[in-house]
Image: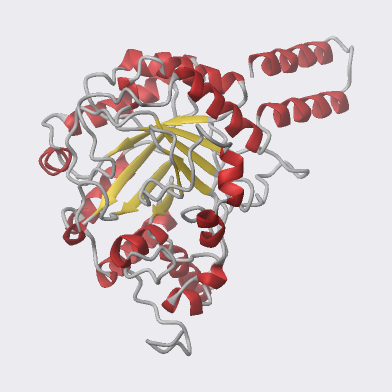
Amino acid sequence: MIVGQAVIKTIFAQARAGICNSLVIVIVVMRVTCRMYPAALTSNGMSPALDLARTPFIVIWELTQACDLACVHCRASARPQRSPLELSTAEGEDLIRQVRNMGAPVFVLTGGDPLQRPDLFHLVEYGTRLGVRVSLTPSTTPLLTRDALAGLKARGLARLAISIDGADAASHDRFRGVPGAFDRALATVGWAHEVGLPVQINTTMSRHNAHDFDALAALMESLDIVLWSVFFLIPVGRATLRDGLGGEAIELLFEKLYALSLRARFDVKTTEAMHYRRYVAQQRKLTGASRPADRRHPDGIGRAPRGLNDGKGFVFISHLGEVYPSGFMPRSAGNIRREPLAGIYANSPLFVALRDSSRLGGKCGACEFREICGGSRARALAYTGDPLAADPACIYEPAGWVEGAA
């Protein structure tokens, strides 16, 4: 990436000196950009329509499961100590090269707490030099400081994602299991702004905080963020079945999320609530509204493709190298220590089945929104044991569908 930036600077300097013309500038800059970010541009300069059967939109690597927090909903059941079996630095570098070669637009480093790994700064810089757009989801512990953020920014980190699950210290700290986590999360947002890092907030909605949605939304509107990613709890790790929300409660939150999305200065998305796309499509049809234009953020990360789902444009690599359709679906399709990530993603029977909407069961299989939604495959697995079953948290009934029908 540094080489690419140097080339661009040289070309513009030559243009000012009259050595080359504007057409040359356009051609060279686009060629360098495509080399730096192979999935960043199409012929019209917009984000491309990815072939999700071969190229994921987002790759997430769980660097470690070590973490000093004790979150009640932790999907990783994080622990204080690192595992000696984690992917090594060299294996991580190889994974990053594979991500670059696949052309995945978004690469996220997560945990546990990624800051528990001393090679985190190197890995961020290594990915950046290869042209991989790297994001980070750290834990808000004393390891997360302004100096750490400045160092990560200097090494090319594109975006920071911070978790806030309560609108005040009492509710958030109870969720995270450590006093002071809320204050550190807000301080981190401020530090990120100071060093020039775009900020995304992740919030997991569950029975513990659904009643506090309005206050959470007001908090988000008070922060200068680029995205609010609202997760709907899946009972894996420490989370239990009773922690999740029912279909009616989720639909009420959809109504509030959609209203917020119309006025907010930031983007709003859901995770493991694919049927929010169905809700949005219904509302736009009722009102005649069109899909809003993509916001252009400083980090270059745009909206995900329509239809993104577990294993469909999304892939998760565990700290041990196991490849999952998502972090909330801990069913391995292979291990990058034994075979390339591209082959696992494109060819494993699990991933192929998850991308085939004709194999969906129940209401999801009969639904006219299955191509843009498809239901949460992780929730279907957690509640029924079948990743292709209907999403049990969706209350929508497709026209003509009869319960008990094939």
Q: Let me know if residue 177 appears in the view.
A: yes
Spot occupied by residue 101 in the image (x, y as percentages of width and height): 65, 33
Coloring scheme used: secondary structure
**Residue 286 visible at all:** no
Residue shown at 83%/29% (left/top)?
Answer: 27
Depth check, front residue: 284 or 352: 352
Where in the figure is residue 50, as x and y percent of width and height? 65, 49
Picture quarter containing residue 129? top right
- For the point 25% across and 47% down, the residue is 237
Q: Is residue 227 left or right of residue 236?
A: right
The quarter of the image holding the N terminus is: top right
Q: Which residue is drawn at the image coordinates 57% and 53% (left, top)?
A: 305
Q: Quadrant of residue 3?
A: top right
Q: Is residue 144 left or right of residue 40?
A: left
Residue 17 in the image: above or below residue 278: above
Residue 380 versus residue 135 in the image, above or below: below
Residue appearing at x 65%, y 45% in the figure:
47
- Relative to 69, say whether 403 is above or below: below
Relative depth, front residue between 397 and 42: 397
- Image location (x, y in percent) of residue 330: 36, 48
Task: Please tell me how many numbered marks the rendered image carries.
Answer: 0
Q: Is residue 311 left or right of residue 272?
A: right
Q: Is residue 328 above or below residue 129?
A: below
Residue 241 picture location, percent across and down: 20, 60
